[in-house]
Amino acid sequence: MPTSDYLINLENRRQVILERFKAGEARQFQSLLRDIAKDIRARLQEGDLTEFNRRRQIALLADVNELLTAGLGKATGQLKNNLLASAVDEAEFSSEALNKVISGFDSVLPTPDQIRAAVLSAPLSVRGPNGGKLLEPWIKDWSKFQITQVDGAIRRGFFEGQTNQQMINSVVGS
């Protein structure tokens, strides 16, 4: 098999592996988000939330924000670490593949720290208003947006006199 065909086949197999990695990361992240939703649901089910009491509302919002901040911090931190580890693996794979198929070629692999720095300094290729952000600010802004959405739903629920279940449905779904 010619070198170029071998390299194409090798890259195609690697793409399948990356798709599996991506699907696994998505499942893992969804699982962590479900755990956060379960914690929030449990907190919102405590007591009758429809009786407006400013002190209780502030305490509830603080508890929910703490749950979200901790949960999203864990989830996004784990995602970031997995993405960075994947980038190092990809660089190693590419270096080995090129060295194997191109005779007389000896690629120079950047250090893991250099790879991580490159990943964190390259803008994300994301469509929409968040396109072009760096990974860490994108994660931070996404987390902040999620917390703001939940906070607003709870405040609205208190103001509108919603039942516990209506607030839960508004925050985490049915």
Image (cartoon, rainbow, N blue to C red):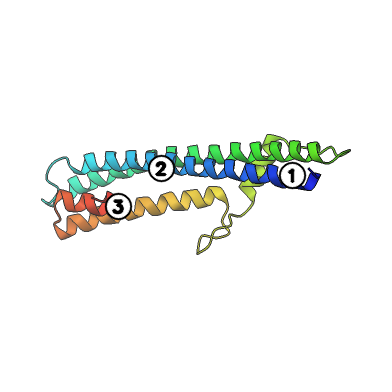
Where residue 96 sits in the image (x, y, percent)? 75, 36
- Of the residues tagged 2 and 1, which is closer to the observer? 1
Answer yes or no: is residue 63 visible: no
* Mark 2 or 1, nearer chain start: 1
Q: Counting other residues with Cα less than 10 Å from the Cα at mark 3, is it few (<14), some (14-19), or many (20 or more)? A: some
Where residue 15 sits in the image (x, y, percent)? 61, 45
- Of the residues tagged 3 and 1, which is closer to the observer? 1
Residue 124 lies in what quarter of the image? bottom right
Q: Counting other residues with Cα less than 10 Å from the Cα at mark 1, is it few (<14), some (14-19), or many (20 or more)? A: some
Give 15 or 118, whichever is nearer the viewer: 15
The residue that label 3 is drawn on is: 151
- Kind of residue at disc 2: Leu
Q: Counting other residues with Cα less than 10 Å from the Cα at mark 2, is it few (<14), some (14-19), or many (20 or more)? A: many
Residue drawn at point x = 84 percent, y = 37 percent = 106
For the residues labelled 3 and 2, the Cα–Cα distance comes to 14 Å
Against 4, is 157 above or below? below
Residue 107 lies in what quarter of the image? top right
The residue that label 2 is drawn on is: 72
Question: Cβ–Cβ below 8 Å for labels 2 and 1?
Answer: no
- Kind of residue at disc 1: Leu
- Kind of residue at disc 3: Asp
* Mark 3 or 1, nearer chain start: 1
For the residues labelled 2 and 1, the Cα–Cα distance comes to 39 Å
Residue drawn at point x = 67 percent, y = 36 percent = 113
Q: Which mark is residue 7?
A: 1
Against 105, is 154 above or below? below
Which quadrant of the figure contains the N terminus? top right
Disc 3 is placed on an element classified as helix
* Mark 3 or 2, nearer chain start: 2
Give 21 or 158, whichever is nearer the viewer: 21
